[in-house]
Image (tube, grey):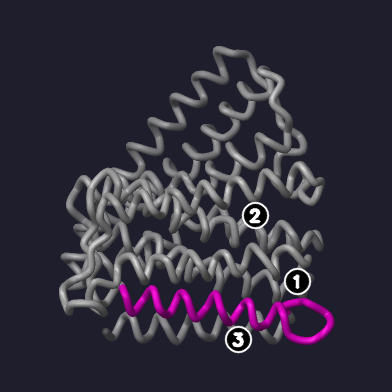
């Protein structure tokens, strides 16, 4: 029971820490006359992926590579199957052209790049590994994506409202600094609690770190995206509802796995490759739903299909 309480406390600290870090850093940026748009594209976007990043770095140092990989792949699966599924069932998601033609295909590229870089098994039959050089390649892709996003913002295709930073609140310099430091501290401590308690639970349940990472840890670290997308869907803001998770998936692979494997190379087990292939399939399926017909939307029925696939995948995972 104690491990469950510690795990829950870890998630509270993790999500709360990310929130305070974003608010404090955004306030400081605002005082430095940085625009809401740039704040949203950088601080807010990266801040929503801070829980996954904290868990991954700490899992890497703790020797739990399976949890680090599982957290990212599991988060991506949860994002595209559950969050988009729930959002579409709340209200059909209408998609703008850039999401269909660029951002979602870029998510497919991220998954394919991960398969290629970690897929040593396909080449020589040896266990896969994300090396430091692989991490640098992923971070290069992340830089290219950020450059594209800034170009879109410059052209006016992205507004502050799209980034969630249209009403950036400012605090005193002292309060802002304390929020940043406190947020970072909560992220580190919360991530440490999650990694240690999840490892203990994995041993108690007879599961691997990878499966725990794919399920409990991935779902917990994806809660901010779920809340953001569900509220956006209820308000009829389709761009935020789906753009939030598309951006998160790209960040997860290119930034989080890039940073994690650059710090410490990550062994990539064959079962993780199977999970990555499922995540790639989910991404391609969403792209297919988005491109079919003239409406360019994801319907309630398609949202239910995505949810059903996730349930089937969970059943497979727990029986693997």
Quarter the N terminus occupies: bottom left
Q: Secondary structure at mark 2?
A: helix
Instruction: Based on the picture, tell me whether residue 113 belongs to the magenta stretch.
Output: no
Mark earlier in primary sequence (1, 2): 1
**Residue 93 badge:** 1
In the picture of the structure, the residue carrying the numbered disc 2 is: 228
Tell me the quarter of the picture where residue 227 sits.
Answer: bottom right
Q: How many marks?
A: 3
Instruction: Based on the picture, tell me whether residue 275 belongs to the magenta stretch.
Output: yes
Q: Is residue 2 visible?
A: no
Q: Which residue corresponds to the image point at 71% horizontal and 31% vertical from the top-left?
A: 168
- The vertical placement of 116 against 41, above or below, is below
- The CA span between labels 2 and 3 is 21 Å
Q: Is residue 176 left or right of residue 204?
A: right
Q: Which residue corresponds to the image point at 59% horizontal and 39% vertical from the top-left?
A: 42
Q: Secondary structure at mark 1?
A: strand
Q: Is most of the magenta stretch helix, strand or loop?
A: helix
Quarter the C terminus occupies: bottom left
Mark earlier in primary sequence (3, 1): 1
In the picture of the structure, the residue carrying the numbered disc 3 is: 305
Mark earlier in primary sequence (2, 3): 2
Q: Residues within 10 Å of mark 2 (few under 14, many from 20)?
A: some
In magenta, the rendered stretch is 273-298
Q: Residues within 10 Å of mark 1 (few under 14, many from 20)?
A: many
Q: Secondary structure at mark 3?
A: helix
Q: Which residue corresponds to the image point at 19% horizontal and 48% vertical from the top-left?
A: 62
């Amino acid at each position: 029971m104690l491990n469950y309480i510690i795990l829950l406390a870890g998630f509270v600290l993790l999500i709360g820490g990310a929130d305070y870090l974003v608010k404090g850093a955004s306030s400081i940026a605002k005082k430095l006359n940085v625009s809401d748009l740039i704040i949203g594209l950088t601080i807010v976007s990266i801040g929503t992926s801070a829980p996954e990043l904290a868990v991954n770095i700490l899992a890497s140092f703790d020797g739990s590579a399976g949890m680090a990989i599982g957290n990212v792949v599991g988060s991506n699966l949860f994002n595209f199957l559950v969050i988009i599924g729930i959002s579409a069932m709340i209200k059909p998601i209408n998609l703008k052209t850039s999401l269909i033609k660029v951002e979602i295909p870029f998510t497919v590229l991220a998954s394919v790049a991960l398969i290629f870089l970690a897929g040593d098994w396909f080449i020589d039959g040896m266990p896969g590994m994300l090396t430091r050089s692989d991490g640098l390649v992923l971070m290069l892709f992340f830089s290219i994506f950020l450059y594209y996003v800034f170009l879109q913002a410059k052209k006016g295709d992205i507004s502050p409202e799209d980034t969630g930073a249209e009403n950036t609140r400012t605090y005193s310099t002292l309060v802002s600094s304390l929020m940043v430091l406190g947020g970072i501290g909560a992220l580190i401590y919360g991530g440490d609690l999650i990694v240690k308690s999840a490892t203990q639970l994995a041993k108690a349940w007879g599961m691997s770190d990878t499966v725990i990472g794919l399920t409990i840890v991935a779902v917990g670290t994806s809660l901010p995206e779920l809340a953001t997308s569900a509220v956006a869907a209820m308000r009829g803001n389709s761009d935020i509802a789906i753009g939030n998770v598309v951006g998160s998936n790209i960040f997860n692979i290119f930034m989080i796995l890039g940073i994690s494997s650059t710090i410490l190379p990550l062994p990539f087990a064959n079962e993780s490759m199977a999970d990555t292939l499922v995540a790639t399939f989910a991404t391609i399926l969403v792209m297919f739903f988005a491109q079919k017909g003239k409406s360019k939307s994801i319907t309630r029925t398609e949202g239910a299909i995505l949810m059903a696939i996730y349930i089937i995948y969970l059943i497979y995972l727990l029986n693997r």
